[in-house]
Image (cartoon, rainbow, N blue to C red):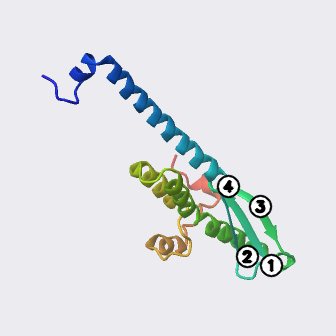
Amino acid sequence: MTSANGLGDLMRDPDEAAARMNAWAQGLAEKAERYRAAQARTEEIRLTSANTDGSVRVTVRADGSVTDLDLSGRARTMPLDELSAQILATMRRAQAGIAAQVAEVMQEEVGDEDPQTRSLLVDNLRSRFPDPDADTDDEQAAAEPAEERPQARTDDDEENNPW
């Protein structure tokens, strides 16, 4: 025995079955179009960040890649290690906004239709591009000195080898 919405009813009325299948296919096509629109808008996202004195300015895409790097004249006077650190920190601040921008696009284009997919996507972006200004235990651990790299072997080491 089948329910009122079961396969038995569809088998009795092929026109109803065809109409339901067409509606289902149309719904999938509309959903695919919304996702295509979200993808197109996401590909247009550009986020720019500048350091505090404006000497470094970085623009990134939604995938995190750098599209533009502007250095002012003041950047020429910075020690190279400081300049490198400023570039990376500025890039990370720009990237930290990616998840929020993509979430906004997904909400506007897809809405509440597929919350699990949207959540997975946005959570993935947040983990890939965390807020560098947020205080976390990971940052404190990263600030601790790293282990030193092993020194290159010397000829004297050969004499102390037990093999």
- Residue 68's disc is 3
Q: CA distance from mark 3 to mark 4?
A: 9 Å
Q: Give the CA distance from mark 4 to mark 2.
A: 21 Å
Judging depth in this view, the residue of 28 and 15 nearest the camera is 15
Which residue is located at x 75 percent, y 70 percent? 57
Figure check: 54 above or below 163: below
In percent of width and height, residue 113 lies at 41, 49
Horizontal side, residue 132 vs residue 45: left or right = left
Nearer the viewer's eye, disc 3 or disc 1? 3
**SS for dot 1:** loop
Q: Residues within 10 Å of mark 1 (few under 14, many from 20)?
A: few
Q: Say which of 63 and 105 sits in front.
A: 105
Circle 1 residue: 78
User: How far apart are labels 3 and 1 at the CA level?
Assistant: 20 Å
Tag 1–tag 2 contact (CB < 8 Å): yes
Q: Residue at x 41, y 48 (%)?
A: 114
Residue topped by disc 2: 82
